[in-house]
Image: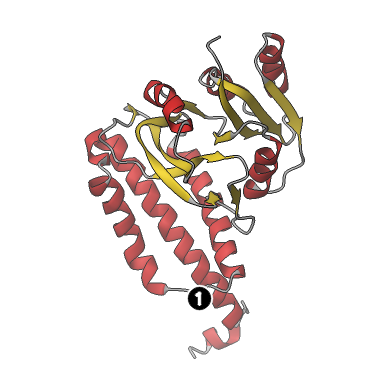
Amino acid sequence: MPAKLPLSAFIICQNEEAYLGNCIESLESCAEIVIVDSGSTDGTAALVQSYIDKGWPIRFLFEPWRGYAGQKQFALDQCREPWCLNIDSDERLDEPLQALLPSLLEAPVDIVGWRIARRPYLIGYGYTPDKVRERKNLRLIRKGRGAYDLSQKVHEGIVPDGKAGAAATGSLLHYRPLMLDEQILKENKYSTLKADQQFVAGKPPRAYKMLFSPPLYFLRLYFRNGLWRCGFPGFIEAATGAVYAFMTAAKIYQRHALQRKPNFDDMERARRGK
């Protein structure tokens, strides 16, 4: 294996046997890999052990599920190296990002983290090309200079204690090609978590968002970000994002509507036409 970088990669997982191997393989330059499992029942544990047996610097821990932000914060807290990289089981570093890592870790002291692009795999196309402008998220952080907002139920991210830069090249490749049947179930789950989070926080409903957020979401992904370059697979990806935007806005509206008017079977009133 090549010389190790002063970098801890941390991964949370449950039943990720089909994806985790390629993720680990892309982290060969990391001095430490922290994997936190929340109760896998497939071959995830055996897969991880096989890498440990080969000498990979993996620490495999079990922790009951704390929610996305809580679980990732627990994993981050276990890291020992000066820099920490958040990566999911179904992600892997592409070659340009692997080549760029050493220079990112040599950043000036005022840079506490780096935002990195993420390129999904689209059924019928493959990974989105470099020219598709994917949003960059904070994934690389100096130890002790960032933490997760534990109030976030979904789309959790590291909140930096200082300035974060944006990696000029390289991406995290996201490989979980779900058919639309499964993807919609995932979007439904995430939109529920988002709606619950905003409802608990007291965010008022915005009925207009049910009308305008979905098309604006689609237009941003398809035209501004460049998913049009991927043909119909890109169209499906953008449209699925629009569905998520609609479900989130509609669920927030319905939660508040139930507070104003709890469900009641007023059959007699309906029969009288009133």
What residue appears at the point 71 percent right and 10 percent down from the top-left corner?
53
Q: Position of residue 169 (x, y in %)?
A: 34, 31
Quadrant placement of the N terminus:
top right
Relative to residue 103, is residue 155 depicted above or below? below
Relative to residue 99, is residue 63 depicted above or below? below
In this view, the residue in front, 18 or 183, is 18
Q: Position of residue 63 (x, y in %)?
A: 76, 38
Relative to residue 175, is residue 110 depicted above or below? below
Q: Position of residue 24 (x, y in %)?
A: 57, 21
Amino acid bearing label 1: Pro
Q: Quadrant of residue 129?
A: top left
Residue 225 left/right relative to 172: left
What residue appears at the point 54 percent right and 58 percent down from the top-left corner?
194
What residue appears at the point 64 percent right and 24 percent down from the top-left corner?
32
Pointer 1 residue: 204
Residue 29 left/right relative to 246: right
Could you say whether the residue bearing mark 1 is in a helix, strand or loop? Answer: loop
In the rendered image, is residue 51 in sight? yes
